[in-house]
Image: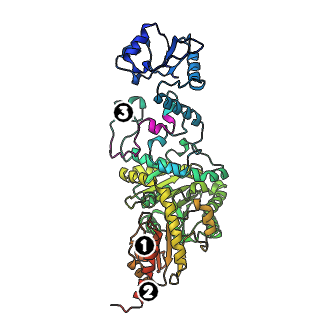
Amino acid sequence: MNSTTRILTITKSNSLPRFLSSHCKAFNDVPNRSIGGKTNDLVLLLPIQQAAPGFQTFRKKTNCENITKCQSRNLSTSNESTIDQIKSKSRCDSSDGDYWSTPSEAGKGAHRLRSDQDRNLLPSVGIGMDTLLSHAGLTGWKKGNHPHDGAKDGQDDTTNHHLSLYSLNEPLCPPLHLETTYTRPPSGDYFNPKEGGQGWIYSRIGNPTRKLLEDCMSRLELISHGAKAIEDATMSWSEDDVSGITCAFSSGMAAVAAILLALPQPLHILLPNDIYHGVPTQLKTMFVQRNVTYSTIDMTKIEKVQFAIQQFLKRSDDENVHDNRPHLLVWMESPSNPQCKVVDIKTVCQYVSKCREDSENSRITTVVDSTWAPPPITQPLLLGADVVMHSGTKYLGGHSDVLLGIVTVSPFTNQGKALTPSIRAIQTTLGSTASPFDCWLTLRGLRTLHLRIERQSKTALQLASYLASHELVERVHYPGLVIHPQHEVASRQMQGGCYGGMLSFEMKSEAMAMAVAGAVSTIQRGTSLGGTETLIEHRASIEPDNGRVSPEGLLRVSVGLEDFQDLKEDLRRAILVAQKVMTMKSG
């Protein structure tokens, strides 16, 4: 009971009960219960908001603030220890009925009790990935209202419980803040809560909707499915650790650029030989004149990755330029776009960590583009990566109506911690922030991400199995197939039996592939991926001539939420039509 609560002992013959009876309905509902054989002594505590207007006069006369109901005898209003005992007894020791004055009071009491139970739990305990996704953006999850924050000094502990979302009467839809600027307190201090400051200045610097998304993504990269990984890597985190580790950008490519700009130069980037063509294109067109170079290797072969790193370190040491040694960025994309190659993220990061044990070799950073494997499937930070990025346009948004990129840095590695302020500064200073509306749409998309990715993964495996058995299909790329070269790694690295909703397959020629794409009906021709509709695209014909990474006969498929039989039949007929077209004379 807080210090503003007072308990009154009231005798039936007093005038106060008559005052209460005439002004407060709840008093008339109090039964004449007996404790110790006496019926004339009552202790009445009643919520002010339930009292009639006339009761305010009584409150002022008696110095009562908050009220609930209990009974005893010979009570002293000044004895706080007695008050606590009565409160405890009234809740726990009753055997003769309801000690709460109203059902509302019972609800509030249960809320406080649950809050007390949850207060000392770790943030990673008791909250599953699916639950966090389903509640994405709800303010009850934010810091200061998190299920396991506990009460702060001078703060009512009921506002920190995970049920506070409901008890505070807050919206169940994340708020959309479109404002660009905020009023300034008279002192000029935006950050002084005593003067009403909340830290909001200008939307480029910070926006409440964007922060909801960023905070949610920070937790998604570290929670639930990663429990075993946390245990294996002796990783633990708190709300303070993850505050500010995620930045939302205006696109996936803006996120890529932010990572590159945040790293020291000269910079050499080790890329996989199968990768989204936009990354090498950006390097060639925008970063080549900024002392940034890159090379490509097959990152599915760990020995090739190790050799490339050793060669880089040896070459930079031989140059003996200690004041300006180049930095190495190991860029992983898993599964890769478009051939679905799977990199063993944990093994690569463990080798990099071993190299970094020598302080001279701390100039290596690991990044994973996990766009094709969102958090319900893979959490690269828990596998040892320094940075993870997503094109939020794809699976996170999930409805083909968002343009957004996400970067989250590790709170566990020194490289990740060092990058946090740099990436944040690039986001706000260069103005490449995600719009509030795109952030809001992404939060909406996250609420069904786990359901969508499970359905898409299931259908993708069925389609891949069908295509793998088709006599006219040359090759199928999908990590869920046992015949996939990295199936064992994928099974270990990708969670929940899900291998993602992306697959690709190859026809014998570019013309045959284009004919198949031209003949589909249910499946739509289009670029991008991760939406509810199934898309097919001939990749080589859309890639720049000097930057092609896709085989000529490859078709990439982003599996949506349609019925599997409809998609299978559409592909079956499309392949038959393509076969017939290829036997016909042109014109």
Q: Where is residue 240, by image quadrant? A: top right
Q: Which amino acid, by three-letter code, is at mark 3? A: Gly
Secondary structure of the residue carrying tag 3 is loop
Instruction: Please give left or right for residue 415 compared with residue 282 in the image.
Output: right
Residue drawn at x 59%, y 49% as measured from the top left: 412
- Is residue 385 at all visible to an observer of this figure? yes
Residue 115 pos. (x, y %): 54, 34
Residue drawn at x 60%, y 13% as measured from the top left: 36
> In the figure, 9 relative to 520: above or below?
above
Instruction: Find out whether residue 16 is within the magenta segment.
Output: no
Which of marks 2 and 1 precedes in the sequence? 1
Residue drawn at x 52%, y 10% as measured from the top left: 40
Residue drawn at x 48%, y 74% as measured from the top left: 549
Instruction: Please give left or right for residue 252 compared with residue 587 in the image.
Output: right
Count of labels in the image = 3
Which of marks 1 and 3 precedes in the sequence? 3
Residue 534 pos. (x, y %): 43, 68
Can you identify the residue that label 2 sits on? 579
Instruction: Please give left or right for residue 188 compared with residue 45 in the image.
Output: left
Can you identify the residue that label 1 sits on? 536
Task: State the separation of the CA atoms marked 3 and 1.
Answer: 55 Å
Instruction: Please give left or right for residue 229 compared with residue 251 in the image.
Output: right
Q: Which region of the structure is painted magenta?
A: 159-181
Quadrant containing the C terminus is bottom left
